[in-house]
Amino acid sequence: MTYNLLYLDDDPTATTIADGFRTTGLINITVQRPTEFESQLEELIAGQEGIDGLILDLKLDDNLSGERKARYTATSLASLVRSKVKEKVWKKEFPIFLFTTISKSNNLFSSDANSRDLFDWIFLKEEISNSSIQFRIHAIIEAYSKIGMDKPNLPTILDLENLSRLDKRIFPSYLDEFSSVFNFSRYILNELIVAPGPLIDEYYLSSRLGCDVKASEDWDILKNEILKEAKYSGVFSNAFDRWWMYKLNDWWQSIEKENTLASLDARERVEILSERLGLKRLIVAEPIKKSSSYRYWTVCQGFNRPLDPREGLRIDEKDPLPWQETRYISIEAALERVRRDQGLKVHPLERERFNDIKKTFS
């Protein structure tokens, strides 16, 4: 199904930019220049039935020429739209996406981190050629429809028989029948899908199995066929590949009863996988430069490669929730300032240790 989105941007080249959203056929974009605040809101209310999602440029007030002009930012409009959801004039909930540049987003969120909470997802204009943006937009809109029909039934939303194997603290009490679709969607996406914990992505999966994804010709067979039952199939799954960690552990115990995954290093894990499953084209992931341990369990956020957390540095982000995992960057990535322009930095509590490490390699 193709979804219809309204894209508000005062940039004269917005129509050309929007062409980058049309390469998959998953979404249809209507470009419109924003107008004065109250008039814009009235237009959105009047046309809400034909809108499946809203894309906003961050700085709607950059261009004040012409008849249609805005004197507000995307955060102001998004905030008002969110507040209007419970009013009778607003009959349809739809996701709101922020579409901006790295520099503008860094400037905004360094001064107002809460602004992130207004948007379902943030996309960078520098990445418009990446078709995964369209898949994610489509998946989020689809999730709104699923959640709207099934909330507050979380097992149905997550496509599980029940939640008995999950930490009871994961789902807050405010996610009830009175909670908005946006609250359900954003919470599940950010606190369960994106953050490593009960669900892990392909990078974490490769780390915990000890495999080099690029060099292992049998990797796709392992992750897509053999581990099919462990794969997540709930909302957002058509754009975010994830695996349930508890199901992965159950599966591992079915092929290796004496040793848990965490008790083995990558070489031992891959040897067991090759012998028990006949996958002879699995290659052990080698340690990142300036690392030596094969006891991988986490992922270097700079290189997306397996890492022993004891050899990593905690990254600077909000403290993980009890069921989530701390994320790390390798020493090599930290020294090379990998993804620094995207905000990837060493946690303040690790800086003294990092300074000592830098002296070792200077």
Image (cartoon, rainbow, N blue to C red):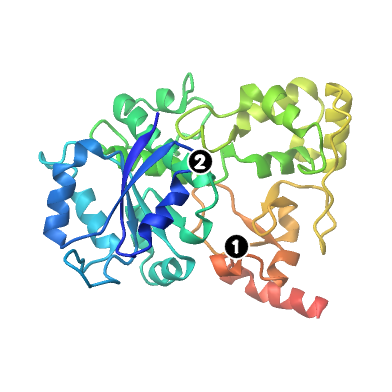
**Residue 221 makes an appearance in the image:** yes
Which residue sits at x=20%, y=55%?
80
Instruction: Report which residue position mark 2 lands on.
Output: 193
- Mark 2 packing: few (<14 Cα in 10 Å), some, or many (20+)? many
The quarter of the picture where the N terminus appears is top left
Which residue sits at x=45%, y=69%?
106
> What x and y, as percent, mark residue 223?
70, 30
Instruction: Report which residue position mark 1 lands on.
Output: 315
**Residue 172 makes an appearance in the image:** no
Dots 2, 1 in contact, CB < 8 A: no
Instruction: Give the mark nearest the N terminus, 2 or 1.
Output: 2
| Above/below status of 178 relative to 356 | above
Q: Nearer the viewer, residue 76 or 297?
A: 76
Q: Is residue 307 left or right of residue 29?
A: right
Q: Is residue 239 left or right of residue 335?
A: left
Q: Is residue 25 left or right of residue 270?
A: left
| Above/below status of 86 relative to 166 | below
- Give the quarter of the image for residue 219: top right
- For the residues labelled 2 and 1, the Cα–Cα distance comes to 19 Å
What is the three-letter code of the residue carrying label 1? Ile
Q: Nearer the viewer, mark 2 or mark 1?
A: 2
- Marking on residue 182: none
What is the three-letter code of the residue carrying label 2? Ile
Which residue sits at x=45%, y=31%?
235
Q: Secondary structure at mark 1?
A: loop
Which residue sits at x=48%, y=18%?
161
> What x and y, as percent, mark residue 91?
17, 36
